[in-house]
Amino acid sequence: MTLGWTPIDETIELTNGDWIFERTNEAGPIQPGTIIEIKWANGVTWPGTVDGATVKWRIESTACTAAIIPDGTAFEIMVCYPNAATSSTDDYVWMGGRALRTNYLTQNF
C-alpha cells in the first residue's frame, strides 16, 4: 500500500560542521508515535525528532556523526506510521538520494 506519493530525490550536503534540517507537514500535526529517520546505506541511522507538524534533525559535528558518511553514500528517509490494527508500523520512503560531501572550512574563495 502506498500513500499516493513518489519519494523525493534529494541531496544531503555535508560539511565539517553540524547538519541541521527540518520539514513541516503543511497538512498539520504528524500522527503521534510516528518514527522518521534517515537510513544510510553504510548502516548509520539518524533519528528525527517529531514535534507537532515538524520533524527535525541536528547532527553534531563534534560527535563525528556526520563525518562517517562518505561522499556519494545513498540514503532513504523513512516514515513509519503506527498501525493499531497490526501493532506494527506502516513504513514509507519519503526521500532518497545521496550525500554530497563538501569542506567549506578548507576551501579558498
Image (cartoon, rainbow, N blue to C red):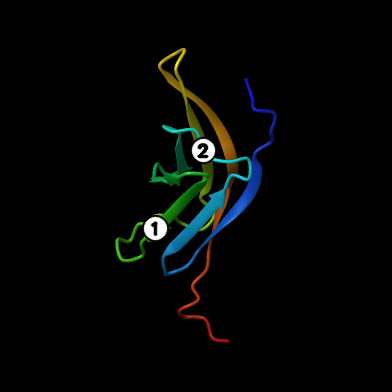
16 relative to 45, above or below: below
The residue where tag 1 is placed is 59
What's the amino acid at mark 1? Ile
At x 65%, y 44%, the residue is 8
- The answer to whether residue 107 is seen in the rendering is yes
Badge 2 density bin: few <14, some 14–19, many ≥20, Cα 10 Å: some
The residue where tag 2 is placed is 30
At x 53%, y 40%, the residue is 29
Taking depth in this image into account, of 81 and 18 the one nearest to the observer is 81
| Residue 22 numbered mark, or none | none
Q: Identify the image quadrant of the C terminus.
A: bottom right
41 relative to 19, above or below: above
Q: Earlier in the sequence, mark 2 or mark 1?
A: 2
At x 53%, y 41%, the residue is 76
At x 52%, y 42%, the residue is 77
- The answer to whether residue 40 is seen in the rendering is no
